[in-house]
Image (cartoon, coloured by chain):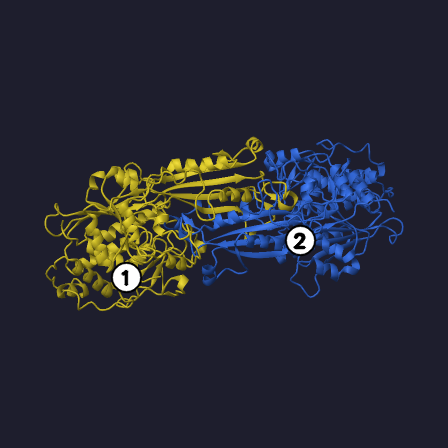
Chain colours: A blue, B yellow
Amino acid sequence: MESQNARPRRPFRLAALLPAAALAAATASGAAAPAPPAVEPTAGAALAAARAHREARGAEILSEFADLVALPNVASDLPAVRANAAAIAASLGRRGVRAKVLALPGRPEVPPVVYGELRAETGDPGAARTLLLYAHYDGQPVEEARWRQPPWEPTLYTRALEAGGEPRPLPAPGEEVDPEWRLYARSAADDKAPIGALLAALDALAAARIPRTVNLKLFLEGEEEAGSPHLGDYLQAYAGRLGGDVWLFFDGPVHQSGRPQLFFGVRGIAQLEITVYGAGRYLHSGHYGNFAPNPALELARLLASMKDAGGRVTIAGFYDSATPLGEAERRALAAIPPFEDELRRDLGLAASEGGDARYGERMALPSLNVRGFVSGSVGETARNVIPPEATASLDLRLVEGDDPEAMLDLVEAHVRRQGWHVVAEPPDHPTRLAHPRIARLVRSPHYRAVRTAMDLPIVAPVVAAAEAAAGREVVLTPTLGGSLPLYLFEDLSGLPLIGVPIVNHDNNQHAPNENLRIANLWYGIDLLAVLLTMPAP
Amino acid sequence: MESQNARPRRPFRLAALLPAAALAAATASGAAAPAPPAVEPTAGAALAAARAHREARGAEILSEFADLVALPNVASDLPAVRANAAAIAASLGRRGVRAKVLALPGRPEVPPVVYGELRAETGDPGAARTLLLYAHYDGQPVEEARWRQPPWEPTLYTRALEAGGEPRPLPAPGEEVDPEWRLYARSAADDKAPIGALLAALDALAAARIPRTVNLKLFLEGEEEAGSPHLGDYLQAYAGRLGGDVWLFFDGPVHQSGRPQLFFGVRGIAQLEITVYGAGRYLHSGHYGNFAPNPALELARLLASMKDAGGRVTIAGFYDSATPLGEAERRALAAIPPFEDELRRDLGLAASEGGDARYGERMALPSLNVRGFVSGSVGETARNVIPPEATASLDLRLVEGDDPEAMLDLVEAHVRRQGWHVVAEPPDHPTRLAHPRIARLVRSPHYRAVRTAMDLPIVAPVVAAAEAAAGREVVLTPTLGGSLPLYLFEDLSGLPLIGVPIVNHDNNQHAPNENLRIANLWYGIDLLAVLLTMPAP
């Protein structure tokens, strides 16, 4: 994988670059030193402060972040998410943020939102820009057996596991931090990394006495990985507090090339579970093989009918409702240097779906993915049976123009056209006897895609901040491949939405051995320090 | 399901049918009564003795059998199978059988065989027929979570679970036993039922003082469900003891119609596990969906290419080596009344593979079955990922003429023709980059089919015994659908081989909730009592 930016791997000492006062503040041990005068808020000063703070206090930043990701945080575990919310609000409070743990009125069983406000320190706060920062503190469920170490026992590795990384202790105070180290833990990347970066960025600016130029509002969700079932309710309940200039969504990974990116849209999502049925019980494959139909093979045939060998979905109408990319988006995509060959190499793929098509073109199309397929057993527990049923779990990623229910309707119509009788509940005996092919379809929560115009006035300073933090051009992506429920923000506030991912693209998000590359945490700190000192409009 | 035979469901009192002496012995409580004179060994006397014994001692038969199936017996658990062997040898010894637990010379880690001899009690034992009885006392591994009760805690139900059966205690001594009850436990059917039936049959004949007319040799295997890896070694090591007139294989279920059957052949078996690979790690289905190939879908497409919607295997040459059935076998098949509609109803199937083809015709063809298909997760644990691999476990059932390795070669050639690069080990990174489609094929132990001529002299008395025990015509099946390693017996002894299944066809063999219908245990007792009193040649 390409390095995050053009910096050398070993951090160099910043003394030569940093204003003297900022350096003194950043490297002083705090309380004992007399307060030096405030420093002019510029991108250069903010970056120098962030880097000096990382160099002086890198071990403490990692230690505090490890404590944060050590908290189990699956949304269904209410006491756990509450403990996360309280810890985060306390950490923010120590930085002067007016932080509150917000409950959904009348719904104490819903994971709370951590809300926070921090006023600009220059000029008239009423005239300053207000940035609304979104992240989520809950994490995906874990399959603990597949992890190298328990998912909530954060462990530092010398590099990625796939690259031969070895575990090592957290650094001692003052010990140099290698930015290629990785911290392995659930939510180290998705999505506690921005929270850790914000805490460090606030410390860095404070240590260097660089005043913030913008108002900041934080909205940290606690059930994003559960499908954000109450996000809309929260936004409506607290709409009065959520005015501002732009929503910045800190979620998802940086570009696959390793370069930072901003994104202006996300795909929507819809999910569908298909279960097909054979005989009413497990059958001996000898006594019934060639007589009783095999549901695993029947489901295989059904799925194979949905997508061709080139990766094109063959369900009638699947691509018809997608809004094609406009001229601005096509230009942005064309400006991205080709990285697909490198990505394929990194993923261990000789070929990708869509042949030579650019990655960005593929993300601008709806997709159909088999998340899981289970029937009977394989390996040591396989037995000579015909399994009674087979289940596949599908997710569809949707683009601007696709209606989730209408897309699921197309899949269901396809299943029927293949000769299947569609049911909503497991079939009873008479139903089984009446239909040779029975498929149970269960739809799951889903939402539509969103895309924001790239020529609004607020876009330019955010792009400039990202380029300053990255020290290079950043990738501008019209539509991210992943999904966030941004439509809720679009519906409720009408504010522009910009995605600001910071974590490494190979972070094993949603999977075993999730990890955060330390260089990406450093980028997040830099980016937030520059955003918080953005020039007034 | 049709009743096992024409008997009414409530057992009737046999006093009127039974010779007075036999009745006295069968109903006497044993030691205290003076020994009455021996009874002429006829099928009628043997049957009457068996029935009287069941009526008088049904509770004790079930209790002893429940103790036998309460012993965990997965072949890989060596202490467990040894405990089974010791218990069975002791039970046989109490009936006068010279029983031994045989180890494989020099291989103490191999599950033992229980061997036993019992001489004829009439005429010259040297002139009597010698029946060699095979069964196995080990059982399939269990997926305990799928069982209604722990698999080695035998539980009596008032009928099949699928028919609304409710658990009930084992009967008290003297309590009437309903033959429609079912005993649920691992190996209740496969394959401890014949052992339980033999113990009761020996007791019944002894109680009625009916002398045995045949020599009996027992060969009870302890690792059949592990693929009989040492059966050939055992047969060679103890070949000197294994002379006789016919091997009777007590394994497998009765005919699907519920009627008893004899079988004269079995299908062979070959197994194959196919794993296909996507990216080298789990990927977020949003960020990579439409770019990274989905291995579950690729494997689905590969499997779908192997078999058409009508159940015909589309692998080139798959049916070419099968020896067609001869005239005698065709006549035997034609004599079986149609039962396929009833079987489909019982299984909950609106249609079976091969359309209107007879069941027997389908079993005379090789089959390809998907035992399991696993990729990612479904249901509550499904996540929005592209799984890195997908695995299917296949079993092939083979018929006379099919060479196992050659059949697996055909499958492998088919996989290659579909564009897959075939490997034996998980692919390394360079291999992944060199081939867009990689399939790992792992073959498992397997053996060929066997078919025995139906016009040998020993066949007629065995058929007569089964018809006497069943009280009706029995089904004569040229080739059973299931597999047994009968080729080893064919290779080593050249003796005729007849399969003598006794257990209900809906016994959930190899699956959760295995069970034995009590009426089928009764049939086994009857059948063995008649076989042991077979007329001299």
> What is the number of callouts on the image?
2
Name the spot of residue B467 as percent of width and height, x first.
23, 57
Name above or below for residue A146 compared with residue B27: above
**Residue A502 image point, x, y percent:** 71, 42
Question: Helix, strand, or loop for circle 2?
Answer: loop
The chain holding disc 1 is: B
**Quick one: A300 or A86, which is closer to the camera?**
A300
Residue A170 — which label? Answer: none
Q: Give x and y (percent) for residue B487.
A: 29, 40
Which residue is depicted at the point 77% across and 38% down?
A52
Is residue A485 or residue B81 the one in the foreground?
A485
| Residue identifier under label 1 | B5
Q: Is residue A500 left or right of residue B518?
A: right
- Residue A201 visible: yes
Q: In the rendered view, does A424 fall on the left or right side of B331?
A: right
Residue highlighted by disc 2: A224
The N terminus of chain A, quarter of image:
top right
Distance from disc 1 to disc 2, alpha carbons, whole Å, reads 62 Å
